[in-house]
Amino acid sequence: MSESPAARIERELAEGGVILLDGATGTELERRGAAMHSGVWCAMATLEAPETLRAVHEDYIRAGSRVITANTFSNHRLMLGPAGLGERSVELTRRAVELALEARDRLGAGDTVAVAGSMSHQAPLQPGTDYRDPTQLPSPELREASFREMARTLSESGVDLILLEMMSDPAFANPAIAAARATGLPVWIGYSCRGNPRGEPVSFTLEGLDAAAMLRSTPVEGAGAIGIMHTNVELVSPAIEAFRRQWEGPIMAYPDTGHFEMPNWVWKDAISPADLSAATLRWIDEGARIVGGCCGTGVAHIDALANALGRSAP
């Protein structure tokens, strides 16, 4: 039996290799003209602009990505329900994974490129901000049921691994991690931070929780990788340092750039592909082994990263 993409990537990481992720999916969809939804950002683009979404995945593979991320970030009922789209969760997730798999197959990259199913613990946001709306936080029971459904759907749809994204609140992250692990798939855990008044990384949603405490508050045993994502470039190095003290496995680093105003991404002051490449090489020296970009980045950033890493497309 041939080696699966996930197993191949795991082996390469164990051998000290560096794995290149893709960049932002939603941002790239918006850049190419896909409509953004006021409540769930890029979720509906899966049905409204499927050819554009497939093309985004294909372009990331051509640029050199070894992992492409299905457009499922906002697909659980915690986000879809308040937007009146809760009953479409399974449909949207299955179709998003299908398009990612199609993109991989069309380029003949089934042996080398893994498809990750993104699962966040995002809740509805306050209008015009990237902060959670405290009036719409779901109950513990709803969280657990939503994460179980989402993880099960991702697994049944054929993803190679589950990529937990924007983990920052243990009350939400822990049931999400449990649901992902229950599938038996490899699980990578991405944490998100903001800067506190002293410029130190703290939880994206709980400002009193620093990066080290955020990691300690979640069960990471058995994870294939953990890391920092959807976080300002300036905070990546201190977060890597905090994580490295507690975690000996592969570390991810894929920051955001620019500014988000729901449902649109503003590219003002966004980092250039060259500058992201230079920063990423530093993060690799500091211990990162899985690198890429999050919101605000695009195919040009990944292409530049692939060149900086001396990689060609698989």
Image: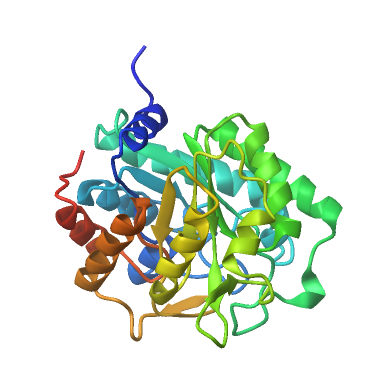
Question: Is residue 117 placed above or below 44 in the rendered structure?
Answer: above
Q: Position of residue 252 (x, y in %)?
A: 42, 53
Residue at the spot 33% in from the left edge and 41% down from the top edge: 103
The quarter holding residue 115 reads top left
Q: Position of residue 2 (x, y in %)?
A: 33, 16
Residue at the spot 25% in from the left edge and 60% down from the top edge: 281
**Relative depth, front residue between 41 and 151:** 151
Q: What is the quadrant of the C terminus in the image?
A: top left
The quarter holding residue 205 reads bottom right
Q: What is the quadrant of the N terminus in the image?
A: top left
Task: Count the labels in the image.
Answer: 0
Left/right placement of residue 55 relative to residue 115 reads left
Residue at the spot 54% in from the left edge and 86% down from the top edge: 198
Left/right placement of residue 81 relative to residue 69 reads right
Left/right placement of residue 153 relative to residue 54 reads right
The extreme front residue here reads 245
Q: Position of residue 286 (x, y in %)?
A: 34, 58
The way the protein has been coloured in the rendering is rainbow
Left/right placement of residue 77 relative to residue 22 reads right
Residue 34 in view, yes or no: no
Question: Is residue 13 placed above or below 53 in the rendered structure?
Answer: above
Residue 186 in view, yes or no: yes
Residue at the spot 71% in from the left edge and 50% down from the top edge: 174
Q: Position of residue 149 (x, y in %)?
A: 70, 42
